[in-house]
Amino acid sequence: MGRIVIREIGIKNFVLIEDLRLEFDTGLNVLTGETGAGKTIALDALGLLLGDRFKSEQVRQGAEKSSIDGAFDVPKQREFQAWWKEHEFEKPDEILIRREGFPDGRSKAYLNDQPVTLATLQELGAFLVDVHGQNEHQQILKPSVQLTLLDRFGGLEEKRELIAPLYRVWKDLKEQLNAKALSEEERLQRMDVYRFQLQEIEKAKLKAGEEEDLNARLPELKNAGRLQTLATTAYGLLYQDEGSALERLGQADKAFASLKALAPSVEPLSKELSEAKMRLEDVAHSLQSLAERWDVDPAALEDCLNRLDLLSRLKKKYGATAEAVLAHGEHLRAQLDHLEHADHYRKDLEKQVEKAEDELLKASLDLSIKRKKAAKALGDAVQGELAALGLKQAILQCHIENVFDVTPAQAGAQSENALGAGFRRHDGAAYKFTLSGIDNAVFEWAPNPGEGIQPLKAIASGGEMSRVMLAIKSVLADADAVPTLVFDEVDAGIGGLTAQAVGKKLRSLARHHQILCVSHLPQIASCASAHFQVSKRVSKSRTFAVIARLDSEDRVNELARLLGSQVTPASVQHAKELLAHNQTREQL
């Protein structure tokens, strides 16, 4: 059976529901109930977790707010892992989504206790749940999704992945080539600008690290007089003045000489004193050198300030640091070289573009051929499923068309430049390349004999759409990565044997996916692995909606109610037989 993806949903003060927590099963979960009982409330709550907009009237009357939370398993598909990493969320053990809605129409959304936007929830929801019903999330109707599903069905994902890097290389080279398509006047003007900028940088004769050295030297130049005075004073106190530190150390050194004669044990102290005297002499001489260096030099100060000003002006034009300015100069040299030898570089680039186009076109055409074969197989397989679902006369096919296709006659009337940067001629036609190749996949549909076939999205009714989606999902069960499927109105306009076929198909599909289905037909409800009943009750003049998972006895009674307007011994017996038939091992 399918893996549990939606583990549970908690609903508080939402429409008619006061406080409810639903735990879903693997496989097929069916919700039934009397007309008007509110079977779709649970689906509306799920929709909010998937990014639907909150409506103020959904807050239960008298409540301060509505809250809905859901716990989901973490999807395994690579696309989800890439999306999660791109958004820099912490690696989760489970996905927890929470929505809060208020009577004034405000709402809040949280993902693993972090505030998120509805757009983020909508993107996430596409990985978690696919809702099929009138005016609901119908991802499969999107052309990009149809092409992705076709590639999965045909086992073409690896070949498709080869297209993207080829496309990026080709596009980059093409853009470089287009950028070189300058008029002679533009080329000369650009060369003049580049030469002026390069001369300005070269004339400055910048050196890496120069700015740091200048900034370190500037305070010394500004305070040269004060620094010289302080250094000279310190030098005098240490060495030159009468009674200086070194003069007194000399006197102490003589005293130690006498001490050593009487007490040889002071020899180590005498050595330390001598070393201290030598170090102090070094300090004094260093101070003398600094005092000479710190001679007041207005010209040097002006040169330093002018140099820093020049650096500042160059940085404003060409880069944030001296190193960046130098790097920009190297870039200008390369650009000048390309402009001065434009013909040579353009011809070389044209060869590179042509080679990249050939590789991209070969891979795209190869993928396109395989897609057309897969599209035929997909259409045939779905057609077989439709017959078993009460749509024997309907036609569904998958059509592959080029993203852009110019006929030989049209191509002859257009110049190569008129086709634009995204097009490539081949055998009298021009194709537009994309990251996924040169194809579009279109699911086309004709519900009745004699009617023209049109894109599925344009003409399928809600009831038909659910069954078509069921047929497609059955065929694509192994390929479709969305783990949970929700079907609303899947039983619209059917009954009898067709309803039985739909129920079996849902149960079969539940081997690969967790399924939630709202139904009013006993043939479908009897196929479920978990059966939930939606009912209404009135207490203290307030109406409450209740959703309860049925045990075996209550389930028989609910099936009996669905079989007829009243629960009778005959309808109970019929319900038991129907349940026994659809719960056999062969149906699991």
Image: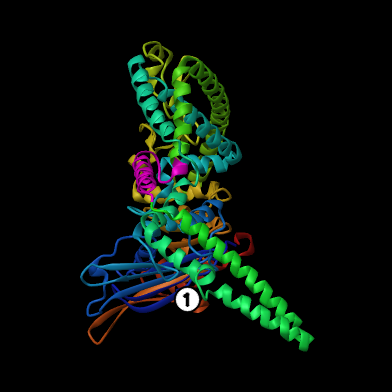
Q: Residue at x 44, y 24 (%)?
A: 336
Quadrant of the drawing holding the C terminus:
bottom right
Which of the pair 93/388 is nearer the observer? 93
Determine whether, in the image, residue 195 is placed left or right of residue 555.
Answer: left
| Residue 134 at x, y percent in the picture | 34, 53
Q: Is residue 149 above or below residue 549?
A: above
Say if residue 515 shows up in the picture.
Answer: yes
Q: Residue at x 46, y 51 (%)?
A: 212
The kind of secondary structure element at disc 1 is loop
Question: Which portion, as a residue range, is magenta?
Answer: 297-324
Query: Label 1 neighbourhood size at 10 Å, few (<14), some (14-19), many (20+)?
Result: some
| Residue 19 at x, y percent in the picture | 36, 80
| Residue 476 at x, y percent in the picture | 54, 47
- Magenta span: helix, strand or loop, mainly? helix
Which amino acid type is shown beneath numbered disc 1? Leu
In magenta segment, residue 314? yes
Q: Quadrant of residue 269?
A: bottom right
Q: Is residue 187 above or below residue 246?
A: above
Tell me the residue that label 1 is attached to. Answer: 550
Q: Residue furthest left?
A: 104
| Residue 553 at x, y percent in the picture | 50, 78
Determine whether, in the image, residue 377 is placed left or right of residue 486.
Answer: right
Say if residue 523 shows up in the picture.
Answer: no
In magenta segment, residue 370? no
Q: Quadrant of residue 155?
A: top right
